[in-house]
Amino acid sequence: MQKVVADFTVTANIALNSGCHALVLQSSGELLPILPGQFVNVEIPGNKEVFLRRPFSVYEVDDASCSLTLLVKILGRGSATLARVAAGEKLSLVYPLGKGFTMPAPGDRVLAVGGGSGVAPLLFLARRAALPPDSIHLLLGAKTEADHIDVQKYTDCATFYFTTEDGSQGVKGMVTDHPLFGKLSRYNKIYACGPLAMMKAAAAGAVEKGIFCEVSLENLMACGFGVCLCCVEPTVKGNLCVCSEGPVFNINDLTW
Amino acid sequence: MVNLAVNIGGLHLKNPVMTASGCSGFGEELAAFYDVSRLGAILLKGITLKERMGNDYPRMAETASGMLNAVGLQNRGVDYFVREIYPVIRNYDTALIVNVNGSTIEEYVEVTQKINALERIAAIELNISCPNVKEGGMAFGVSCPAAAAVTREVRKSCKKPLIVKLSPNVTDISEVARAVESEGADAVSLVNTFLGMAIDAEKRIPKLSTVTGGLSGPAIKPIALRMVWQVSQAVKIPVIGLGGIMNSTDAVEFFLAGAAAIQVGTAIFKDPFTPLHIIDGLQNYLERHGFSGISELSGRLQM
């Protein structure tokens, strides 16, 4: 698979809520194909404290405008700097990186469980899956209503369910407290991307019922393309790089 | 057109820019970005006699102008390399150099003997400077007698140009360089990473599973440059410089300090094209300053 280092122009920086920004980036040339679950490695401009690039799952791709959108959740100095870029600024991206999700097939009944910036690849997956919206359920968890992003424009491609720890939106509690979690057998594919505890809970449910399940990991990376061997995850095939052998893994390959 | 070709102790390279071991896999990952035949050489990921799992995660911590790593020589072992990887990469039109590691002298020798048989491997880099393994590794690189002993034994069985990669975690790196030179090393490469540490203040825990790790990146460049300069004065064999080289100006500084060739490591993580940018930049520098070849630049520091 051909990979490139390419300059993108920021065409919009939209604050989705207090801690999360959508960055729309336009490629100066043709956009290489990007699959749901794949990621880009972004050079952080103008912050000498940040040496390495930062990896972000792709949230949306628009081939017509050669643009992609990233969901930047402010977690540290890299994401904080990136969340401040203005339209017109240039960003250097290494992409496309990693292996994406196994795409759902017609007739599949899908549950996608996400939280935080983990929402990004799951929404990308939902849009690309081309399943009826009632066949693909997105269960999103957050601390409070303000942490959930607005998914109105995606309701034609998936059905959404929410949990919040304070009960301000959807079911009160964690995603595992949602009634959907008691009915996992109705699904034949489960995807998860979010905090580790959330993914492990989804994976445990899937394993118990023998349901196909993929999770997207975000181990700390240096290179993003499989040469530094820093982001390894123990698997049944040994220590594998999350950046090049993942970030999406079938839970049967993990040692959770 | 200036001449970028160099001869490093019998190792002929089309240009003096190599990718450092552990920073370019087995070349295949870089080949996804560009034609690797433009590189002077690829230093392959370090290999050992037996498979090694490497250290536990987390293995990396970003630091000011650099990073710490604690990978710990994760690799599938020399037999796997010979059987599965070598046939895939053997046709790359660049010099392929195997980075050889071991816990004992016998292991270093055994790996070297298995590599001897591979005709497309241009040289061996003897790694006596890995800071992230409990046995062997850097232990051989921080004492002159140990460095001399492992070089002597490997030299006896090594049929290819032998480069010894030195550790900076010593009081006088020149002494170690002289010790391996006297035992038949064809060249030395320096420096490997500096032993360092990072702490998560909020959680009050080390950031690396191994507590300490190897520091690389621009943070170490001034010290690496000083060591290359010192070693160049101390030995007659060619010196390969590395340590925080990010661009062609950094590379020129290493040549001026006495390096005959350079390696690019951590910079590849930021931009895999860095070695190619450096080749272009060196070409441009030599033309601008009226040099006809890169070898004229080595050691031309004006005092």
Image (spheres, grey):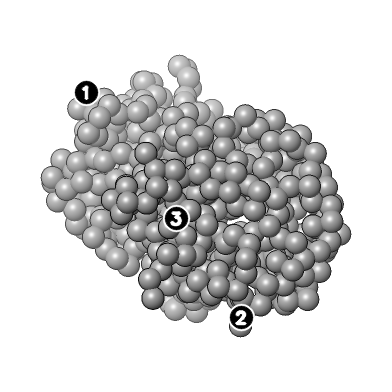
Disc 1 and disc 2 in contact, CB within 8 angstroms: no
Determine whether the residue tagged by mark 2 lies in a helix, strand or loop. loop
- Determine which quarter of the picture holds residue A130: top left
For the residues labelled 3 and 2, the Cα–Cα distance comes to: 28 Å
Q: Chain of mark 2?
A: B
Report the residue marked by disc 1.
A64
How far is the residue under mark 1 from the one under mark 2? Answer: 60 Å
Q: Give the class, few, some or many, for how many residues have Cα within 10 Å of label 3's Cα (few <14, many ≥20).
A: some
Q: Residue at x 32, y 67 (%)?
A: A49
Residue B302's quadrant in the figure?
Answer: bottom left
Q: Is residue A1 left or right of residue B102?
A: left
> Residue A48 appears at what percent x and percent y?
29, 65
- The residue that mark 3 highlights is B296
Q: Is residue B24 above or below residue A109?
A: below
Q: Residue B172: which numbered mark, if any?
A: 2
Mark pair 1, 3: CA separation: 52 Å
Q: Residue at x 52, y 57 (%)?
A: B260
| Image mark for residue B102 | none
Determine if residue A92 is in view: yes
Q: Quadrant of the N terminus of chain B?
A: top left
| Image quadrant containing the C terminus of chain B | bottom left
SS at mark 3 in the image? helix
Image coordinates for residue A245, horizontal then vertical, percent: 56, 40
A167 vs B32: above or below: below
